[in-house]
Amino acid sequence: MGKKLMIAAFAILCIMSCSTDNLDDQTVTVDESIPEIANLVTFVAGTEFDNSLQGKYVGVFGHYQNSELHGKIYINAGMDTRYSALIELINGEVLKFNGTPQARGNKIIHFQGKAGSFNINFQDYRNPQASNVFINDADTESYITVVKSTAGADPLVFIGNYVDDTDATFFGNWDLITNPATNTVTPFSTTIPGVPFPVAGTAVSQEIVTMSISHAGSTDPFIINGADDFDINAAVACAPGGVMIPTTEPVVLDITIPPPFPGFPTTFVDAISAGGQTSMINGIEATWSFNYTSAIPIASIPESYIDNDCNSITSGTWSWNGRTGTTTAILE
């Protein structure tokens, strides 16, 4: 698919989408007298927590051998003087935990639930450290990587995986986390051939600042931190007309388009734009590209990927240490 067709397809996806995460039943045990944080997934922390240990943290949970132990984690660190956590696994299971401070100043919290337990040290709230992560009776330790909600926004988190093209035993998790402090809201309006009305909406973008990669043969994930560790986004020109990516760094975009006519659904589309990247993984240079748009179930349109030249492909790509393979999104 050429660049013009890809742009049109992207925009048409935006028009037709009505998919969104089903969060209605995902609640955690917190003080019900404070209903605004009764649902930890949808609650966004106020900016008064930006520079303190307290607040909301969002990130990824995974295990280096068990691909089912993989998903998103949400943490309430003392916003209502209580501590709680919730993990959404890729298989749909939701794990809930209550937290208990283990040190003066509430810097180290022990989280316990029916599924297991873990500790998180919030002393450096810009880079919390998890330890002793044992979930669902796994004999070996899982891992947790989180980023703090700041500037009135949650980090955007994409859960994915990777595999070698010729060696299925070489696989693992490939996850991306953004920095909400870079949150940029851009209204847009564009005209699409064949669509009899202008398409207008809002694109919210956040810079990708953390890439967490776990490998089947390594107990600890490889973490690439900081926007400076990412290259100029080679696929920035592939954005649909009118949807501006306000930075040359890799970004995740949440796109919302109000219904054009009564009875039409509001459109929600998630996208990743991270083309032409180079990262050091375990001391060896890796090249990778991941440009993705989420599926549109109501229109029976699958998720889509494009290469750095805006042509349609079937997945993200990577090359490392003489190996090549694919990266795919498994949960937005």
Image: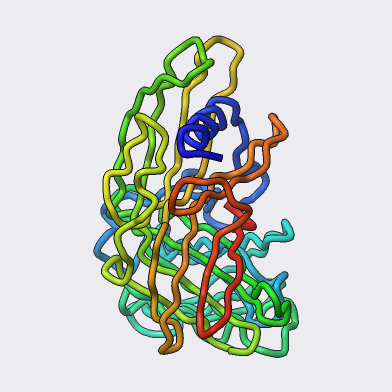
Q: How many marks?
A: 0
Residue drawn at (75%, 82%) of the image? 137
Residue 251 x/y as whole percent: 38, 53
At 66% across and 81% down in the image, what residue appears? 170
- Give percent across and percent down for residue 99: 53, 72
Going by the image, does 171 lie left or right of 156? right
In-image side of 49 versus 313 (left or right):
left
- Report whether residue 167 is seen: yes
Most foreground residue, 116 or 234: 234
Residue 95: % across, % down:
67, 64
On screen, residue 51 versus residue 67, left or right, reads: left
Residue drawn at x 32%, y 43% is 245
Compared with 277, 200 (above or below) is above
Taking depth in this image into account, of 294 and 12 the one nearest to the observer is 12
Q: Quadrant of residue 331?
A: bottom right
Residue 138 percent location from the top left of the image: 72, 84
Asked if residue 178 lies left or right of residue 67, the reply is left
Q: Residue at x 31, y 57 (%)?
A: 249
* Quadrant in which the N terminus is drawn: top right
Looking at the image, which is closer to me, 267 or 79?
267
Q: How is the image coloured?
A: rainbow
* Camera sees residue 23: no
- Pick out the residue farthest to the front: 2
Seen from the viewer's position, the closer of residues 221 and 108 is 221
